[in-house]
Image: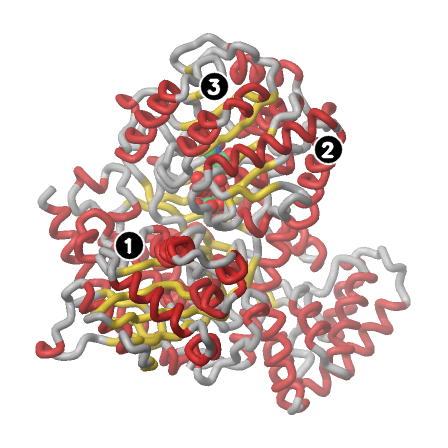
Amino acid sequence: MSELLQTVLDSEERSDLRQFFSEIRHQDKKYLLRNDILMSYVEYCNKYQKSAEFYSGSHLGKLIYYTQEIILENGNLCLIIRQKIASQEFYRITEDLMVEVLTIQELLDVRDRFVNRYHPNEGDILELDFGPFYDYTPTIRDPKNIGKGVQYLNRYLSSKLFQDPRQWLESMFNFLQVHQYDGIQLLINGRIKSHQQLSDQIKRAIAFVGDRASEEPYENFKFDLQMMGFEPGWGNTAGRVQDTLSILDELIDSPDPQTLEAFISRIPMIFKIALVSSHGWFGQEGVLGRPDTGGQVVYILDQVKSLEKQLQEDTTLAGLDGMNVKPKVVILTRLIPNSDGTLCNQRLEKVYGTENAWILRVPLREFNPKLTQNWISRFELWPYLETFAIDAEKELLAELHGKPDLIIGNYSDGNLVAFLLSRRMKITQCNIAHALEKSKYLFSNLYWQDLEDKYHFSLQFTADLIAMNAANFVISSTYQEIVGTRDSVGQYESYKSFTMPDLYHVVSGVELFSPKFNVVPPGVNESYYFPYSRMEDRVPSDRERVEDLLFTLDDPVQAYGKLDDPSKRPIFSVARLDRIKNLTGLAECFGKSEALQEHCNLILIAGKLRVEESEDNEEKDEIVKLYSIIDQYNLHGKIRWLGVRLPKSASGEVYRVIADRHGIFVQPALFEAFGLTVLEAMISGLPTFATQFGGPLEIIQDKVNGFYINPTHLEETADKILEFVTKCEQNPNYWYEISTRGIDRVYSTYTWKIHTTRLLSLARIYGFWNFISKENREDLLRYLEALFYLIYRPRAQQLLEQHMHR
Ligand code: UDP
Ligand code: LCN
């Protein structure tokens, strides 16, 4: 049993526990989440006049802190305790404090009973259990190393491999033979016939290139190397070739994981990449602003540009320029015939600023043209993905003149398509979630049947389970995306076990300790977003136009509100008008603080200004709410609300103009998976106050290079901002300090260069290990296929039939 629970039971706090549980039993709520539990505990402590020391310092206080859920059943309490990251324990506690440990199966039954969906007489429910597939794969032990998968994998597999030097050399020799570009052999040729010979030839070649000037181009001596058995791919100059060969030489003589990583990272094995963002509305102009075409589109476009550049650099360094090697990156998305003035109806669109990166659009098959001709919400897309993958495969093969070397899925739907494509073409699969819906919607699995009409979570969660287990590796933007924080469950973690009543029980849905998980955060587009102080790169006329738009322009189509005093310090935010983005919360926080209003104006760039212009119900509600907050707190003269979607160049200038005026940026989301606007604001030099719920918690270091806020505590947030503003008024240097540290934080940690170097190195290393260890994943993949065909496909078919009748 949990030590903590045992300690409470054995101590004098036992009576408090009994009393507290009795209070809970008398509440109306029968299913308490963490917030409810904490609130009840506060009430309990108040009612019984417990000291502050008892509240947080007692064992009971700690137990409550770690309790994620309490479910009441027949007077008993079921507790879900998460004392350590990524591990949960379940207990049933009776009125007289008898404790019984529950298995996960028993807990899932409790949850089913809670929603009256427990029917044991009708037979057992299907149990999904991925656990056995991970029994024989390496797993990380310490939770703090979760997300550093590749380092671990390298160490683990190297030590196994290096134990048998003969086998190891043989494997390496085989691996070096397989690399080609468009049918042309790379690295080594048939003249080297064995690993013994390889080792000798490497030493000869090192001596040979060592005699040449370091900068001498590879082309000058390529035939000599070829005679020794070496094809292109080792380097573009004598120096580089010598370097690469020496790393390999060292690896053969005294292998160690770092040398191995350094060597594999240099191998030219990735030239063509396909990224999948199937739900579409993917383009370079006029597409942002639909639900989930915000950060995801921005992320992928910037990533692709950076990937192409990195691949080009790698190709040049490998000495392949003479072979006319042209890396290619393709973003695969759906073609949407009725594209509302965007280019989403065009098959091919070149990505700006690249030589060979393209958006490739493949139409959905025409099941019901009323739907398939138009944009379809990501929640409704499921029936079309299988045939989309089949059609997309042909298009990809044609466009890339062969198979991609790596396929990266984005979001639940793109990851499922990535799975189908990787399976068919046998290529390394990488997953990126951006955000998983399961933890975004409360009780999304428990009440899935009630939500099915609107969200079809049965399809989405099944797709997620399939894709995350199938992926060779997963990239997350933050650690907490995988396993949360001390007090909150991670997005992937929420797939560990859950019930889908009447459909299936997941007893082990994901191995969080698997080295497949790697934290690789995104960057920010540095040509659009850069520090306000870089005046030489700013265009004065743009600056003036943006200043006018933000503070003065009198144009009811674009702007609402006239500022009484435009010179006050601006508090700025930009986001879609989603409930979860909570811009209305920020307006209310500003409204509640007269002191803040005295010092600052509030400037919002958000969605649309008129309900009639919006097609999205949530956005409509938020528009109405924002107007009513402005009236309720009489914010007229103190707020400007711009209903515009700015092109990137202008949006970069917006942050800088706010920084010119020593303003601040606030990101008040109730939950933010990562938060690209936080990076954009910080790199521009804006002191940033961002939500403590989600990614910003890892981007910002509180009070060092920005500030955390709890967006559900309005007064507290207002006070934090006010404190900062007052401090800056007393000491203007303070603003510069935070501003500079914010800029440094982004440049040191969140650049696309760092991201893509890491991503490509991961892709090579996972590709290498797949080859070498011939890691047999076939059993797992077969299981996943069965889920796809037996659960996913029939449900998708049902949804399709509904669509046919629309
Ligand atoms: N964005 C924009 N105009 C808007 C709202 C957002 O250009 O009116 C951009 C913003 O600059 C950022 C992205 O859209 O690059 C939003 O990404 P984020 O990760 O913050 O949130 P998401 O919308 O993906 O949840
Ligand atoms: C989706 C989100 O919700 C954001 O938090 C991320 O920043 C964005 O995708 C890019 O990954």
**Residue visible at 65% across and 69% down in the picture:** 264
Distance in Å between CA atoms under marks 1 and 3 = 45 Å
Disc nearer the start of the sequence (3/2): 3
Is disc 3 placed on a helix, strand or loop?
Answer: strand
Residue tagged by mark 3? Answer: 639
On screen, residue 89 versus residue 146, left or right, reads: left
- In the image, what residue type sits under mark 2? Tyr
Q: Residue 38 falls in which quadrant of the image?
A: bottom left
Q: Is residue 661 above or below residue 801?
A: above
Residue 1 disc label: none
In the image, is residue 405 above or below residue 562? Answer: below
- Distance between the Cα atoms at labels 2 and 1? 52 Å
Residue 49 x/y as whole percent: 44, 56
Q: Residue at x 37, y 25 (%)?
A: 626
Cα separation between marks 3 and 2? 25 Å
Badge 3 crowding class, 10 Å Cα cut-off, few under 14, some 14 to 19, many 20 or more, is many
Q: Is residue 268 left or right of residue 425?
A: right
Residue 578 placement, left or right of 373: right
Classify residue 199 as left or right of residue 612.
Answer: right
Residue 542's place in the image compared with 501, above or below, is above
| Furthest residue in direction top, as rendered | 554
Which residue lies under the disc numbered 1? 385
Q: Earlier in the sequence, mark 2 or mark 1?
A: 1
Q: Nearer the viewer, residue 783 or 245?
A: 783
- Type of residue at label 1? Leu
| Marks 3 & 2, CB-CB < 8 Å contact | no
The answer to which image quadrant residue 492 occupies is bottom left
Return the mark for residue 734.
2
Mark 2 vs mark 1: in front: 2
Label 2 residue near ligand 1, CB within 8 Å: no
User: Looking at the picture, does residue 379 appear above or below residue 38?
Assistant: above
